[in-house]
Amino acid sequence: MYKNLKRLSFAIMILLIIGIYININKNANMMSFQDDAKSEITIVVWNKVLETEIPSFISILDYYIPKFKEENNVEVRYEIVYANTYEDYIRKRNLKLYQKNGPTLIPIVRNEINEKILERYVKSGVALELTDKISYLSKIYDGLKEEKVYYVPIGMSYTAMVLNKNLLDELVIEEPNFDWTKEDYLSIKERWLSLEPRHFTKRDYIDIVKGPLYELKLIDDNNRIKLNTLEVKNFIKNARSKIFSDSYILNKDFSYEDYYKIFVEGIVTPEWEKAMRFYKGIERECLVLTLGVNIFETQQISEKIDKGNVSILPEVIKGNNIFYTWGFIVNKHGKNVEKGIEFVNGLLNDDIQFLMYNDGALTGGFYPVNKDIQNKIEKLDIKYSYNEKAVKLKMYILYRLRKCNIKPYSLDTIAQRELYDMIHKDLFKFIFTDEPYSDEKLSRELQKLEDKLNMWLNE
């Protein structure tokens, strides 16, 4: 009996020793993990499954991260979210953002999709207000500044309008100045259309439908949507009249669904790709080329102007849709938020921003937002003898940005644009229907749509 008790006591003592050893190691590992967590910040990024490259628009970070790590003794790690679709990425990313010690930084491209996401992150408390926390914000162009800062722009892009100069010469039309207007463009286009019927393209759809629609005043002073109006009915009738006139040739191989995917959804499907191949084949006949060119890519713009077959100008129809930025939100729930703020602030530093210009070929396709380095950039443009018109075009846009004559969309306009995107989709059927709606039927349909959207707007 005594021997058994002795053995049992010995066994218990051994177990206690093992337990203490395990706890010591566990605590040590936990402390080590916590130390590691304290010395790192993470940037959440999307990579499609089987892709391994970091998205190009943040390639400037390849230069900056080693410098930041050395100066701050902080590890910077990409937290990659693998997803096949953008929607799936956002869903998976959102799950991470509300966790304690989640990703520190969220890269955002302020285009039509991400504006809604930015607003959502502000309202839900994910986005940390940075108004008084980023000391270098004073360096950015005035057109990029907001009263309350939740998003810090790092680079920017402005897609130019590219006219077929060969056609301008055939029409004996002098190349427009940079301060040309929508009326100037439409006058040139009307003259071009008067010579012979032209293939109807996505650009024509923007000119006739999307551009004019987004200019309509559809919300009254009581925050009510008004669609069943003479103004909207006339817009639909005028759009149909122009599209189905003798001025345009509609491709018989494209169905209603094809046109919806091309003009509204813009998604990559076999039908959409078929349409894009067709448009590429007739591009020499088009007044406006489908080629998208960033006005800030001085080297590329210079080369295209030197060839003499294009006229590159500021956009006059699409408005702010062609000017956007990329930058960061700091996650309020993220790890090492203060270090994350330092990281973002440092990206606005003169030296780092200057690296983005890269002798006129922009790093990641984005131009620096720091106005204080403009003199250094101008000296580079002179050094490399870029086309004078290309440089002046860039300076014209930057001047307008300084004067706040152009701005990316602000939080104040997001809800309205989301509404107009919805209206755009719903009105498509009235414009592209084979047979026009009678006034009575159109009124009924517009009223139903108006009621539905008012419920959404005021819920």
Image: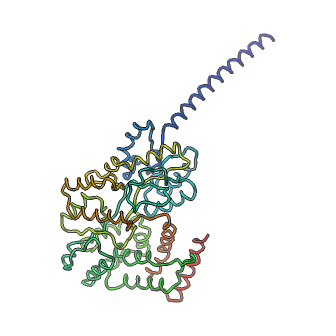
Q: Residue at x 43, y 38 (%)?
A: 72
Count up the numbered dots. 0
Q: Is residue 164 left or right of residue 3?
A: left
Q: Residue at x 57, y 28 (%)?
A: 28
Q: Quadrant of the C terminus?
A: bottom right
Up/down of 312 relative to 3, above or below: below
Residue 79 can be seen, yes or no: no
Residue 137 can be seen, yes or no: yes
The one of 447 and 197 positioned closer to us in this rendering: 447
* Residue at the outermost right position: 1
Q: In this view, does 361 lie to the left or right of 273?
A: left
Up/down of 24 relative to 165, above or below: above
Q: Which residue is drawn at 31% across and 53% down?
A: 373
Where residue 385 appears, as percent x and y from the top left, is 18, 57
Q: Which residue is drawn at 45% across and 38% down?
A: 75
Where residue 345 appears, as percent x and y from the top left, is 43, 48
Up/down of 415 relative to 107, above or below: below
Scheme of image coloration: rainbow
Where residue 331 appears, as percent x and y from the top left, is 52, 50
Where residue 315 appears, as percent x and y from the top left, is 33, 70
Q: Residue 248's image quarter?
A: bottom left
Up/down of 8 relative to 62, above or below: above
Q: Quadrant of the N terminus?
A: top right
